[in-house]
Image (cartoon, helix red, strand yellow):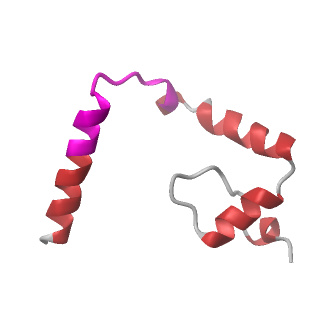
Amino acid sequence: MNDTKTLPDVVPSATPSEAEIAAWQSLPRDEQVRRLRFELSRPECGIVGTATFEELRARGQALAAQLRNG
């Protein structure tokens, strides 16, 4: 079965499911590139942040701890 039929809008993701990985890998390379370019052309992708990687990681860790502790 072709997973792109059940996941027609599969896009690149930082945390894809197994089905999304299979669907993405089943796409031809030119379709993967087209979808990547489309996703990266969104206005929010052009926003330049000022936080460092370390600051972003610390925020993420604090949020994860907060969610774990309820």
Quadrant in which residue 32 is drawn: top right
Residue 31 in percent (x, y) is at: 82, 44
On the question of residue 8 being in view, the answer is no
Image: 53 above or below 14: above
On the question of residue 66 being in view, the answer is yes
Q: Image point 77% across, 38% down: which residue?
A: 34
Image: 31 above or below 19: above
Front residue of 54 and 41: 54
Q: How many marks?
A: 0
> Which residue is the extreme one toward the bottom?
1
In the image, taking residue 24 as reference, residue 16 lies left or right, namely: left
In the image, taking residue 61 as reference, residue 15 lies left or right, namely: right
In the image, taking residue 27 as reference, residue 12 lies left or right, namely: left
Image: 65 above or below 70: above
Q: Image point 22% across, 52% down: which residue?
A: 61
Q: Is residue 56 magenta?
A: yes
Quadrant in which residue 68 is drawn: bottom left
Front residue of 40 and 55: 55
Quadrant in which residue 39 is drawn: top right
Residue 42 in percent (x, y) is at: 57, 32
Residue 2 in percent (x, y) is at: 85, 71
Q: Is residue 2 magenta?
A: no
Q: In the image, which residues are magenta?
A: 45-58
Image quadrant in which the C terminus is located: bottom left
Image quadrant in which the N terminus is located: bottom right
Residue 65 in percent (x, y) is at: 17, 61
> Which residue is the extreme one toward the front?
54
Front residue of 16 and 8: 16
Q: Image point 73% across, 66% down: which residue?
A: 22
